[in-house]
Amino acid sequence: MLDPLFCPTGVAVIGVGREEGNVGHEIFDNIRAAGFKGKYFAVNPKAKEIHGEKVYASIKDIPYPVELAVIVVPSKIVPQVMEESGEKGVKVAIIISAGFKETGIEGARLERQVIEIAHRYGIRVLGPNCLGAADTGCSLNTTFAKEIPYKGNIAMISQSGALLTAILDWAKAEEVGFSKFVSLGNKADINEIDLLQALKNDNQTKVISAYIEGISQGRRFMDVAADVSKVKPIIMIKSGVTDAGARAVSSHTGTLAGSEQAFNSAFKQTGIIRANSVEDLFDYAIGFAYQPLPKGKNVAILTNAGGPGIMATDAAEKFGITLASFDKETIDQLKAILPPAAGFYNPVDVLGDAKADRYKMAMDIILNDENVDSLVVILTPQAVTEIEETAWEITRMSKAFPNKLIYACFMGRSDVAAGVRILTENQVPNYYYPERAMATLSAVISYINYRKQPPKTYKTFYAKKMLVKETFDDARKIGRLNLPDIQAFEVADAYGIKVAKSVLARNIDEAKEVAGYIGYPLVLKIASPDILHKSDVGGIVVGIEDEDQLEDAYNRIIDNVRRFLPQARIWGISIQEMVRGARETIIGVNRDPQFGPVILFGLGGIYVEVLKDVSFRIAPISEQDAYDMITEINAYPLLRGVRGQPGADIDAIVDTILRVSQLVMDFPDIVEMDINPFMALNKGQGGIAADIRITIGE
């Protein structure tokens, strides 16, 4: 559907000024300079010709078909131009003009009017308020950027037009080429989701890179991105990740699960490689675009200096990359051709006096080892170093071993410049520091691991949905959006989540009767719709062993609450069984406005917000997602069991996470939810939700 955006049969620039420097004039010049093979036309009711070519008063006057209209007129005239474009049969319009929703209410109204006209005629719209687009394969450049992109296999999408112009300038200096180049602007119609779909099957594009500031259709974005990532890598840099002051939150999960965590989870679950800077974005893009995907994660390091070799080794460990273990034959061959003082294992140090021939022999031996999937070649410029000759040898090896990834790391700038140019021209990425090479390799390995994952499957559990619906409806009728413990426990139980035995006692006599039924030891908790964090007001006492302690704790909790929150409504005290010998964990949910329910897991209890040792995923989540959440936290060894201690029941945690995922997908009105703590018993013994907090929407 977006083919006319990139390679139309005919394109008209509407609003071509007669003077140099006019935006429409610059776009028209860029189309001419790029060598577009289709027909292109200038439209301006006040001009007759530009550059010796006829100028039309209206797009309707053009005697040829026009699939693409590039609109560069004042915003108030855009609706009229869109009507004329629709009557002409235009398929796609690029609205360069500003003055729409970015300017306020009136601009937003005007933008809606333009899109309504576009929908009526079946026109797709890029922009408004954008830089334009370019397709180097079709030799079409409809941007008003100063630089024209080189031809390459990296597609670039950006919400920021200014950033695109800076990237073009950088790309020219680094001789990096692009397949397509798109500025999204206000995203009134065409957005990053549409472009991902269009680029998935684009033969010119090997890598998709993007700069985004926000996403409006989170779930659809994830579905499309996951599908595209199985075909080609997507690398994104996301700005505007903080959400301070964006919304009030009451639960532990709400405090911890912000926009940044939601985007990280979305990227992780869909195979998108997250770049934290523009430098990372293009390090990764070039690393993917220039070299093949390796078969595995085993890397060899070849260097002429010990220090950089150690730096590369440290970086490999930091990024989870495995150093390849050489076959004995490989080591023997290296010993036969390298000086006695060289390093024969991994990293391989060919020493500072290595010339191009020594690099060549070492590379040939290493790359022939089946245990090596990738090779990073480090060169530091020393007195006898043959920089250009070594660069040529690396490029020859890259062609000789097409199934193995090779990155270069020519350290420095001035002395190695000629060598770097040879590498770049021959599609071997160069990184000036070992850490950047290893970070890129880590991104590549992460991507191939994603592609190897089997299709995700989602468990479905029997649940008493009507009971939950009635509970929520009853709570809303009386204006109670924070469910009390008893109701929260009922909701969890309806989805098969095992909960601690708990009964509400309205006085001490009922408390004693309940205690006899449940059995000691016990936990006492204040029951009040006005108190969310019970421990903050002395509303919890644990370890009640007998009736005397029960009575003392009951009275003490009531006194504490009346002293700290005299206006709080008190329903009574919740008498609950006490679970011993378990690890306290937290399973929580916070509803993100873009992606929906974000599920959190970590160590629980009162320390969750202090330690912040938590992981996130966006629901629905698969069984593998749930296991990954558990293994990601730093405290996972404590759950697995250390120093002879039995491990926690990981399967029970996974089961509960999956049931929570189903619950919040079934009931979008759950805004926040915490199971804190979820008491994970020893392996094979299950787990119990000891405290649950649920907040529903109005």
Image (cartoon, rainbow, N blue to C red):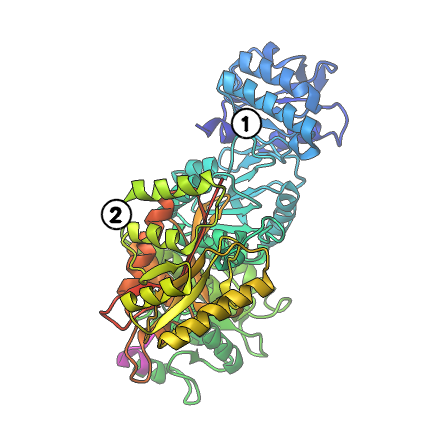
Q: Residue 521: x percent and y percent? A: 33, 74
Q: Residue at x 69, y 32 (%)?
A: 104
Q: Element at badge 1?
A: strand
> Could you say which is closer to the camera, residue 440 or residue 103?
103
The residue that disc 2 covers is 460
Looking at the image, the residue that sits furthest to the bottom is 340
* Relative height, residue 384 to residue 480 (above, below): below
- In depth, the one of 626 and 559 nearer the eye is 559
Where in the figure is residue 123, as x and y percent of width and height? 51, 21
Q: Magenta stretch? A: 323-331
292 lies left or right of 566: left
Foreground mark, 1 or 2, reads 2
**Circle 1 sits on which residue?**
125
Residue at image location 53% in from the left, 30% down from the top:
189
Q: Which is nearer the eye, 63 or 417?
A: 63
Quick one: label 1 or label 2, which is nearer the N terminus? 1
Three-letter code for the amino acid on which mark 1 is drawn: Val
Judged left or right of residue 647, residue 592 is right
Q: Is residue 57 left or right of residue 67?
A: right
| Element at label 2 | loop
